[in-house]
Amino acid sequence: MTLAAGTRVRVLDGASIGHVRTPWYVKGKTGVVAHVQGSFRNPETLAFGGDGQPVRPLYYVGFRRGDLFPGTEGPALDTVYMDLYEHWLEAV
Amino acid sequence: MSHDHDHDHDGHDHDHDDHAEPVAAAVPAAALRARAIEQLLVEQGVLTRETVVRGIDWLVSRTPTNGARIVARAWVDPAYKARLLADAKAAAAELGIDAAPSAHIIALENTDELHHLVVCTLCSCYPRALLGPPPAWYKSNEYRSRAVVEPRAVMAEFGLQVPDAREVRVVDSTADVRYLVIPRRPAGTDGWSEERLAALVSRDSLVGVVDPLEPDLVSAA
């Protein structure tokens, strides 16, 4: 699976045990893939003596800040972008 | 020598203070723990004290001056800016700045329509191979939590008011990419030399919490 730019994605709402690079505040939230950053070793196994294989595609994903933190200050056009590994994303 | 330094393993340059207790209470304990771990690693022959000292020296030999030179070149040379946006490490290398040990680095251009602000909510990922250690505030729990929730209020505390019509894009450096902001070139700097322009580019403007210095704050060169 490779997610194309523009794909709407939901971040999985899984546990954060270990060296997980998905912040809690985007879990279960919906954003849009901006582009693919490349493929990198999986930090969740790499951090514990593993080889990080297979490599995982990493996506630059944009969210509307109002969707992440409803009711907070700021114009509706404000956004939050971050890098998320493919196994944390599902196309919606 | 302080042993509570940040580390850089496999080009994966972030701290792990997300696993630590609140900063104010944890500093002495974290320093003790780091010292104990270092001592064990030395005793077990995994590394030497020299390796540690050289690692620290290398890290602090990187400074925000590198970022300022890169930004100033991008301001005066559109073709360079295009190469910087396409491949930041290669563009740094053109200026003799070797960021090779770093993770992937991406430059983010601030414009009249879009303002980038960089944070690492999970720990303190930062383009250390270019800029050296991050500012203390960048690693604070306060900045890490507030930057995503109320970025405009945080920037206002640094003295920057971003117009409501300009998108504030907070970039959370969560994984294998490090981010460098290319701030907007200040007005009133037409014809300035690259060196003089670089003096306007503060460390904090490379993170996006402020704009570059105003031209009248820098003495004529």
Image (cartoon, coloured by chain):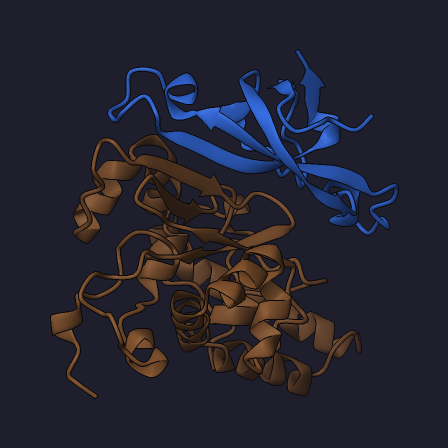
Q: Colour of chain A?
A: blue
Residue furthest to the left: B216
Q: Residue at x 31, y 68 (%)?
A: B201
Q: Position of residue A36 (x, y in %)?
A: 69, 38
The correct choice, above or below, for B211 with respect to B116 in the image is: below
Total numbered badges shown on the rendered structure:
0
**Residue B5 in view (yes/no):** no
Q: Position of residue B151 (x, y in %)?
A: 30, 38
**Residue B153 in view (yes/no):** yes
Q: Position of residue B37 (x, y in %)?
A: 64, 66
Q: Residue at x 42, y 17 (%)?
A: A67
The chain whose colour is brown is B
Q: Residue at x 83, y 43 (%)?
A: A55
The residue lying toward the viewer, choosing from B46 and B191, is B191
Image quadrant in which you'd find residue A85: top right
In the rendered structure, the answer to whether residue B58 lies left or right of residue B194 reads right
The correct choice, above or below, for A10 with respect to B191 in the image is: above
Quarter of the image containing the C terminus of chain B?
Answer: bottom left
In the rendered structure, the answer to whether residue B217 lies left or right of residue B107 reads left
Q: Position of residue B199 (x, y in %)?
A: 29, 77
The correct choice, above or below, for A23 with respect to A67 in the image is: below
In the rendered structure, the answer to whether residue B132 lies left or right of residue B9 reads left
Image quadrant in which you'd find residue B217: bottom left
The residue lying toward the viewer, choosing from A90 and B188, is B188
